[in-house]
Amino acid sequence: MHYHDWEPFCVSPMTPELGAEVTLRVRTSAKAGVLLLERFGEVERRPLQAVPDGLEITLPMHASPIRYCFFLPEEKVYLTSGGPSSTMPRYDRFFHLLSAPSVPEWAVGAVFYQIFPDRFKNGDPSNDPKDGEWIYMGQKIVKKAWDDPVDLKIGPLQHYGGDLEGIRQALGYLQELGIEALYLTPILPSRSNHRYDGLDYLNVDPYLGGNEAFDRLVADLHAHGLKIVLDGVFNHIGDAHPDFQKALHDPDSPEASQFTFHADGSYASFMGVKTLPKLDYASPLAVERWLDGYHAPVRHWLRKGADGWRLDVAHQIGEGGTDRHNLELLRLIHRNSREENPEAFVFGELFFDSTNHLRAHTLDGSMHYHGFANPLLEWLSGRNIYGWEVEVSASEAWQTLWDHYAALPLQIRQTMYTLLDSHDVPRAFWRLRGDVELYKMALGILLTFPGAPGLYYGNEIALNQSNPYEVWNGDPMCRGSFPWDESKWNREVLEWTRRLIHLRKNTPALRRGGLLPLQAPTGAIAYKRVYQGQEVWVYAAPTPVRLELPPSQNLLSGEKMGGRAVVHGLGVFQIT
């Protein structure tokens, strides 16, 4: 096996400073090799030195990232980010190593839990909105009973009363599950239930309990060793926000510079949604007010105790109603976040391929729809994210998973926010037509794969959607209320999830290890996780498959293994 990934043996120091030296090693039995280093458009050849268990070289970090691969002449093979190759790879198949600052240690492999606050738990009914209390999009808002199904026709108008006190009251449940960090969708004052149309970026919505509830929640989370990441909506604001109202009614006001108005009186907005006017960061005032100033929300909430940001539509943040200067703005957000909290974790919602953004040293990771959730669920469900029928084989799904992993900078491989679903897409259990065994296998892949896995509230109890399968819909159907009546929970899935989280947290190779492909039986996917000499093999098979195992231990049953075995569902084996 030839192996190079983000672990202490292979990269030392693991977070090299720009201009400082870094030692790169290949774990291999080869006795000689060459590093091929891309430098200013040329490829330099540098000999590797033999060391116990491999080959190494020390060189300066001349750029971020540095790009390189290895050549092993004895075997006539290049070792690339995508595995062995008989030909020299394209630059995008070179390994990419970023300089400091690196990802925060606490986020490496951490298990997240995403909460849509209005739907998780109502801890204080006294702050619930009243039926018809205000008007949004020309209609009165609706106060729903907790167990009412979501109504597709009135999406953002329906409020269930979930709040931050409810989340605080559920910390025991979340700790028992094994959760290490929360990601909350927006908590700002707003007219909608989703709160992506913020009216005030420096306070918590009173209907969620206000600032006092936030302070109590953060204090309790931190006292129990948990982290909290907030949803940063910096691409757009709500059309009722005072800044936009001033701009709308006074084109000569300073606030007007923060938005992109057209000659016909229209203005740039998120995806054409007029309640969400887009911020224009060509305006120095916009940069100062939202991202860079002392009172900018990017800084404010980290001083208040938040541990990071999930950046909404991160790839769209820009100038002039476009994504112009997007990378520079993301770097600014990241830098300012780290100034307020050196351990801040900043990841983005980049719904599609985020490779170029992440190689540009902008963020600590992204929501891994394109390279994880989409291929995995297309294979298992036979439908893509749009509801179109597809036929994806196990080998095709694996190739997409592997290609996306291989393309990532080394440091970010363990902090990609891997997920099955979220508040924006149909629930995985629904996509899998309520098939418990398929769903357990999907959860098993999520919790044994590299990255920082994120459960969406209710994943652990197989929370479903209320719409028929023929009515393909994510928002709002995936945002049903969490059923605190335990008789409605799928106990089998809950215990399975707890078990997998415990296994992940207590197995270094599963939490921090690199990824390598295994020979997979037809119809299955197979991979190994490797860290500091520990090796764990994972097989995922919707139908029974036969395989040959070296001496190992079944980490799900504790059974000693070796020789022929049959896997149906998920198999996890530590090689002994």
Image (tube, rainbow, N blue to C red):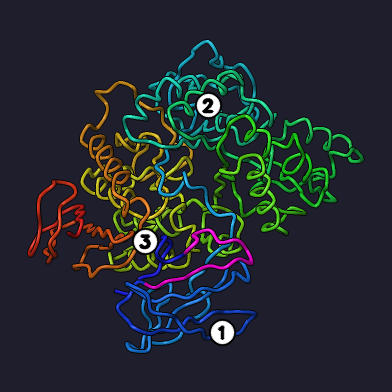
Vertical position of residue 1 compared to residue 385: above or below: below
Does residue 226 lie above or below 316 as drawn? above
Image coordinates of residue 327 in percent, x first then y, are: 67, 58
The part of the chain drawn in magenta is 12-26
> Distance from label 2 to label 1 (Cα)?
49 Å
Percent from the top left, x then y, of residue 552?
A: 15, 58
Q: Nearer the viewer, residue 216 or 420?
A: 216
Q: Say which residue appears at 15% left-offset and 54% top-offset.
A: 553
> For the N terminus, which image quadrant?
bottom left
Look at label 2 and name its amino acid. Val
Query: Can you give x and y, in whole percent of width and height, for residue 570 in the image?
Result: 21, 52
Secondary element at tag 1:
strand
Q: Nearer the viewer, residue 463 or 71?
A: 71
**Percent x, y for residue 396?**
33, 68
Sequence-earlier tag: 3 or 1: 1
Residue 14 in the magenta stretch? The answer is: yes
In the visual, does 354 lie left or right of 198? left
Residue type pointed to by label 1: Val
How far is disc 3 from disc 1 in space, using C-alphas?
A: 26 Å
Crowding near the residue tagged with mark 1, few <14, some 14–19, many ≥20 C-alpha atoms within 10 Å? some
**What kind of residue is marked 3?**
Gly
Whether 427 is drawn above or below 204: the answer is below
Q: Secondary structure at mark 3?
A: strand
Residue behind mark 1:
43
**Which residue ends up furthest to the right in the rendered image?**
252
Left or right of 387? Residue 264 is right
Residue appearing at x 59%, y 49% in the figure = 313
